[in-house]
């Protein structure tokens, strides 16, 4: 499933982690309505018979012919089905999945069944025959009735506001992981691959889309009956059907017809997605070495409701915010569109052509699509610096994985029905992606690609396990990849690599390396061990040297004393590094000369070590101050995020002003260099950096920045073209933070007059940034009011979380008072939101005991591990807030007196403003 939104979201990770991936985030774990056992099973290559599953394997579907007539007015489905079955043993019992369906006229080979027992509790139907049927092919036929859902699970209806006004509905499907059974009775487990021939009867003025091209369309009065061509062998969760007043724009790429489908009136906004799809398909055909096998690939933009994207084979569904580009869209929106398309299209191979045998291996499905998407996004958009941007996701994964309560990437799934899983975005998607990148770096990109090609060829139209992938990579590389990879996927956490340097009399340097698990708090109960693929660079111009760290005390001679040393060169590894004091001082002194990515890895690690309480704050601030006015967006995003975390901790303390002044002084040279106006040759990252810097300076009390933002907002009120869509959020947020009643009313009027969904989300988000408590209460009231349109109801949750930046208590009361309405748009993972996202975002709203008691009262007992994870984060953040405030106080108490605040501000302001 889906993937990332970046941009502005990156820098809030330290403060409100829940929104690291806005909109797309929670959808990303939609499939995860699964119960997972605490440890991974030993795994073997895929075999149908030994693959875990809940349905018996003695009767196997080969082909489904399904005919449905959905009636939106009555929310019902009438259907009939004919399933060609292979009886692998003689039996009188057939078991398959159903939910909320009533079967009639059940026949096997035209003979009536003796009984049909449907159980919605276990989501299974058992058909008993009057006598055992022999081994061989048999045909099961029946008619049935079912439901059209109101939420995105199974076949669902989606109401929306038409572009010309007025309301309409369309229907679409969302099946992963276990909701195909809501639309039609089936063997709803991924190892049961079969072919499908879908027929649907819908209003004649509707268009209909499914995995395959239309084979025939017969109109009878006001209804049309559409039959789609037969699919390849595939699992049920990849079947797709959408219908409504939909229109398409189309292009050809090689042998494949590409279309972007939208509701009528929006099709012009699909042009970017269509161009993206052409580029991505060409690249993937080449990379995978197996061409995309279907005649067409549709991308379907659904308005609202459904909040991510789903990789149905040949018919990918997207929330329209993740596929369409409006004139009001920002570069971050375009990046979001490209990277989500690249993720879903990677699944057409990894997931669709080759499917995991059981849900245990979903991590690799998602990690692989995420890694491939990052690689492709970087390839096609070199000026986006995409791998640097991905560093923020890696950091989010490391934050999560540095908790004692974290879990391995790979966990055995025992029951897909009862509750939400322990899988979360940070580990399942981000850590997995980072581990794959580290492996690719270790094996080399060509060898890694050859392994992937072997894997695709060997398992096409079939299933596979993680072991199958490691075996393919081992065959391609001649190394035991499983041996290296297993320590990363089967155990929680990651190593802190400690470095001790020694010099001989001639200045030659020897380093000794050791490892232990990195935890933000506490110690590892059971010592962990990893095989760590290091890349070590000595000297600022040195070529990284690959070293596999397998033993404690491992040593090597590298470079000269006095040269810089980077043990995670390029910031590719999923580990942290702690240097001995002398090496850290050398690296700090020459910080601005280090390669760019090495600077990022040093900043990331040193900040994490400060957070863990094992390095002094001063060691990090020395690096932050040493960067100078270099225009490096990721390094600065790291620094502004860390400074923002300290600023939050210092609020309402006597030293706050001293810190704010210090933080402004760190950004001042950069602000002076950037000015307010973007230049034609700037990358999107530099433009984003400018917005971040101005916004933080405004937030940290720079009066000149505030005055300029207010001036720009006043002009914007008269002429909306005066602030580019990309810059609106930053300028309006500065104004909103300091808003009075009249300004709030103007911002609210702006939100109400939003021209499209993109503006609507942007302007309502800005409204949540007000600092005045009474205005914040108004903002909270607005979020829950009817003025939020139908297709934006899922945004309410994010808006409430956004409010938590400035008003945690208000966010908490709004959340708890409206919890049912806020989580209703997220069926299947409400418990995950409550147990993990809620404490992560609202940690500062209530005492942890109160927070935990409320959460435990609202989730089932089997979510206990998830609650423990969420609460460990909440408690850590509370502790960290106290510790950082104390550390910052101590740091400033020890500093010499600074330039008086007003004078310093004037200097900063002059430098910023002369640079326009
Ligand atoms: Zn995915």
Image: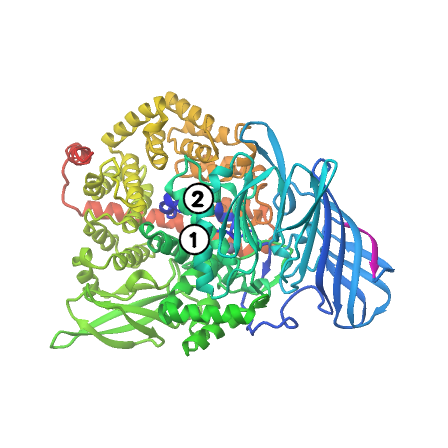
Quadrant for the C terminus in the image:
top left
Residue 542's x, y, as percent? 21, 67
Helix, strand or loop status at disc 1: helix
**Hey, which quadrant is residue 417 in on the image?**
bottom right
Residue 115's x, y, as percent? 85, 58
Viewer-side residue, 112 vs 400: 112
Residue 476's x, y, as percent? 43, 75
Residue 462 lies left or right of residue 525; in this view the side is right
Mark number for residue 279?
1
Segment colored magenta: 102-108
Residue 781's x, y, as percent? 50, 28
Name the residue carrying label 2. Answer: 272
**Hey, which quadrant is residue 46 in on the image?**
bottom right
Considering only vertical position in the picture, is 783 above or below 238? above
Q: Which residue: 51% across, 35% down?
A: 814
Question: Mark 1 to mark 2: distance in Å?
Answer: 11 Å
N-term mark: 1 or 2: 2
Considering only vertical position in the picture, is 482 above or below 763? below
What colouring method underlies this structural image? rainbow
Residue 118 lies left or right of residue 448; in this view the side is right
Helix, strand or loop status at disc 2: helix
């Amino acid at each position: 499933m889906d993937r990332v939104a970046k941009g502005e979201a990156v820098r809030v990770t330290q403060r409100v982690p829940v929104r690291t991936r806005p909109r797309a985030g929670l959808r990303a774990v939609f499939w995860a309505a699964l119960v997972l056992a605490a440890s991974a099973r030993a795994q073997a290559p895929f075999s149908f018979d030994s693959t875990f599953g809940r349905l018996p394997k003695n009767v196997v579907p080969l082909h489904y012919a399904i005919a449905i007539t959905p009636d939106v007015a009555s929310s019902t489905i009438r259907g009939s089905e004919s399933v060609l079955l292979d009886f692998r043993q003689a039996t009188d019992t057939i078991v398959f999945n159903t939910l909320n369906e009533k079967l009639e006229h059940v026949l096997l080979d035209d003979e009536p069944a003796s009984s049909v027992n449907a159980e919605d509790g276990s989501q299974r139907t058992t058909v008993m025959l009057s006598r055992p049927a022999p081994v061989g092919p048999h045909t099961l036929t029946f008619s049935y009735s079912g439901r059209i859902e109101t939420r995105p699970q199974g076949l669902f209806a989606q109401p929306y506001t038409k572009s010309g006004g007025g309301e309409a509905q369309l229907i679409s499907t969302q099946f992963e992981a276990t909701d195909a059974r809501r639309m039609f009775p089936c063997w709803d487990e991924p190892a049961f691959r079969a072919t499908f021939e879908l027929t649907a009867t819908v209003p004649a003025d509707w268009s209909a889309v499914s995995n395959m091209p239309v084979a025939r369309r017969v109109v009878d009065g006001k209804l049309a009956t559409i039959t789609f061509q037969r699919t390849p062998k595939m699992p049920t969760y990849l079947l797709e059907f959408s219908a409504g007043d939909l229109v398409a724009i189309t292009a050809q790429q090689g042998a494949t017809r590409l279309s972007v489908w939208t509701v009528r009136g929006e099709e012009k906004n699909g042009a970017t997605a269509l161009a993206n799809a052409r580029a991505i398909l060409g690249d993937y055909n080449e990379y995978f070495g197996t061409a995309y096998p279907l005649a067409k690939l549709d991308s379907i933009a659904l308005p609202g409701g459904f909040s991510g994207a789903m990789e149905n084979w040949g018919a990918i569904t997207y929330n329209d915010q993740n596929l369409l580009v409006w004139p009001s869209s920002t570069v971050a929106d375009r990046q979001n569109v490209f990277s989500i398309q690249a993720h879903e299209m990677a699944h057409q191979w990894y997931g669709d052509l080759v499917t995991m045998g059981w849900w245990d291996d979903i991590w690799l499905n998602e990690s692989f699509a995420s890694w491939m998407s990052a690689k492709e996004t970087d390839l096609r958009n070199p000026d986006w610096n995409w791998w640097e941007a991905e560093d923020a996701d890696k950091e989010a994964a490391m934050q999560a994985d540095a908790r004692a309560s974290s879990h391995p990437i790979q966990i055995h799934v025992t029951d897909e029905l009862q509750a939400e899983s322990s899988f979360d975005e940070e580990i399942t998607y981000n850590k997995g992606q980072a581990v794959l990148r580290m492996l690719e770096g270790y094996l080399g990109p060509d060898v890694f690609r050859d392994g992937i090609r072997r894997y695709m060829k060997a398992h096409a139209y079939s299933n596979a396990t993680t072991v199958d992938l490691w075996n393919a990579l081992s065959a391609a590389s001649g190394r035991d990849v499983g041996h290296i990879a297993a320590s990363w996927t089967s155990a929680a956490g990651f190593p802190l690599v400690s470095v001790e340097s020694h010099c001989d009399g001639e200045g030659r340097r020897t380093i000794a390396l050791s490892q232990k698990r990195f935890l933000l708090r506490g110690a590892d109960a059971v010592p962990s061990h990893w095989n760590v693929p290091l890349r070590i660079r000595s000297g600022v111009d040195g070529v990284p040297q690959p070293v596999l760290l397998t033993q404690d005390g491992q040593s090597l001679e590298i470079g000269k004393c006095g040269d810089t040393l980077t043990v995670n060169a390029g910031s590719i590894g999923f580990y942290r590094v702690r240097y001995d004091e002398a090496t850290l001082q050398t690296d700090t002194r020459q910080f601005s000369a280090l390669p760019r990515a090495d600077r990022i890895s040093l900043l990331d690690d040193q900040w994490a070590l400060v957070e863990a309480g094992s390095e002094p704050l001063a060691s990090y601030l020395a690096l932050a101050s040493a960067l100078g006015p270099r225009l490096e967006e990721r390094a600065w995003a790291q620094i502004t995020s860390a400074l923002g975390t300290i600023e939050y901790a210092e609020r309402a303390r006597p030293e706050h002003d001293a810190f704010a002044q210090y933080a402004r002084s760190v950004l001042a040279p950069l602000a002076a260099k950037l000015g307010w106006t973007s230049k034609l040759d700037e990358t999107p990252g530099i433009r984003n950096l400018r917005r971040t810097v101005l916004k933080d300076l405004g937030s940290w009390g720079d009066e000149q920045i505030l005055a300029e933002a207010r001036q720009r907002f006043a002009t914007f009120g008269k002429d909306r073209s005066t602030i580019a869509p990309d810059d609106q959020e930053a300028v309006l947020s500065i104004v909103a933070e300091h808003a009075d009643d009249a300004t709030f009313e103007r911002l609210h009027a702006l939100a109400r007059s939003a021209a499209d969904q993109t503006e609507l989300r942007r302007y309502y988000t800005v409204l949540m940034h007000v600092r005045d408590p009474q205005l914040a209460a108004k903002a909270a009231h607005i979020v829950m009011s009817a003025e939020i349109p139908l297709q934006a109801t899922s945004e309410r949750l994010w808006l409430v979380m956004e409010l938590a930046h400035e008003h945690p208590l208000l966010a908490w009361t709004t959340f708890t008072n409206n919890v049912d309405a806020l989580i209703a748009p997220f069926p299947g993972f409400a418990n995950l939101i409550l147990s993990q996202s809620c404490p992560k975002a609202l940690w500062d709203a209530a005492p942890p005991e109160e927070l935990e008691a409320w959460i435990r009262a609202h989730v089932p007992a089997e979510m206990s591990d998830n609650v423990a994870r969420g609460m460990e984060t909440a408690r850590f953040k509370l502790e960290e807030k106290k510790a950082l405030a104390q550390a910052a106080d101590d740091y400033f108490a020890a500093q010499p007196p600074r330039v008086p605040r007003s004078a310093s501000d004037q200097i900063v302001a002059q430098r910023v403003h002369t640079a326009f």
